[in-house]
Amino acid sequence: MTNNRHIPKRRFKEFESDSDWEETKLRELFQYIGNAFVGTATPYYVESGHFYLESNNIKDGQINHNTEVFINDEFYQKQKNKWLQTGDIVMVQSGHVGHAAVIPENLNNSAAHALIMFRNPSENLESHFLNYQYQTTKAKKKIKTITTGNTIQHILASDMKEYKVYVSNLEEQKRIGNFFQTIDSLITLHQHKLDKLKNLKKSYLAELFPAEGERVPKRRFPGFEGEWKEKKLGEVVEKFDNLRIPVASKDRIAGNIPYYGANGIQDYVEGFTHDGEFVLLAEDGANDLNDYPVQYVNGKIWVNNHAHVIQGKNNLIDNKFLLFAIKQIQMEPYLVGGGRAKLNAEIMMNLPLTAPEISEQRMIGAFLMKVEKQISLQQEKLAKLKDLKKAYLNELFV
């Protein structure tokens, strides 16, 4: 027997006995659904002025300021009839279509570009409730069916007028909207903590390692002095590439040993190729040439033929220090090949490396690894919150 009731999988206790949600078209919920300004504002861009909300500023239900564009007063006044109002919902119209956000008080009377505006909602609709409904897996799939274009996707305001949503009573809407706003506040808080830790790490790296062409860092641990010495990588490390074994995904036996490729862990398998403390560098297939893939590992691992495996020689180089020292090298000039740039073993072993005595290396390596661990823990917390939000989105909405 098919259950045709329009109720979510999970409901707050106080609403469990309430009636089914109602299906309705968006045009029945808003007095106005239409486009923000369509055209070019480039000639009116200024260093500072009126913030111009664009599609790049809207992602995952929120407005960000990762990029900022400002327009002059002349152009701003031309858009007076399209100024955004607190409580409006805006949706990305081209590119990453479907991403939406509610206009907060601090963006009241802002101008916007290439967005669909949903204005003057019904008194029985709570804007944040609808904004979070747009973020559900079901809604994203529905929106995708009405988008056009291949290279750049596009959605029409006229199509969104006919788009159907499910609406509960106003009190339940408010409860759901407030619940997800709380989760988003926590996500923002943890993202700020993560960004702060990453910036701290960046500062430490810039101060604990000498600048290019210099031999003494800006910051040192007490008791250390003197110039660092430059050597070739091959003078202080041993290479263990001969132990690598590539295994196609269909031939791998599932297990708990990490299987490493050029960009880190690809899988978990039975067996291992290496056991100990090593540093891995992408040989080919690196996903970022500016932040070249380098990993510190300790224990049993399986490595395929897309990552070099090196280990510091005893009392010459500390492996933890080695990880961060290699990260200071701008790797792109040493790569060969075209589309799939490669770091040849011979070239790798001739990379220039500047290092102090082993005791200072160990201090630097241990300190930076602690910072790295804090970053990893913060990333895990953030990922768990995002997963939690995703799960609730798909359970608290029809």
Image (cartoon, helix red, strand yellow):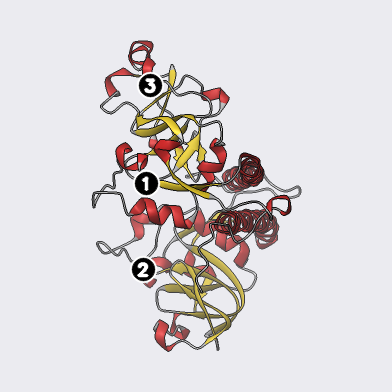
- The disc label shown at residue 284, or none: 2
Q: CA distance from mark 2 to mark 3?
A: 50 Å
Q: Which element carries disc 2, helix, strand or loop?
A: loop
> In the shown orientation, is residue 312 left or right of residue 95?
right
Q: Give x and y (percent) for residue 142.
A: 38, 54
Callout 3 environment at 10 Å: few (<14), some (14 to 19), or many (20+)? some
Q: Nearer the viewer, mark 2 or mark 3?
A: 3
Q: Amino acid at mark 2?
A: Asp
Q: Earlier in the sequence, mark 2 or mark 3?
A: 3
Q: Is residue 129 above or below residue 356?
A: above
- Label 1 element class: loop
> Which element type, helix, strand or loop, lies under badge 3?
helix
Q: Which residue is mark 1?
A: 96
CB under 8 Å between discs 2 and 3: no
Q: Nearer the viewer, residue 258 or 117?
A: 117
User: Residue drawn 45% across and 24% down?
Assistant: 84
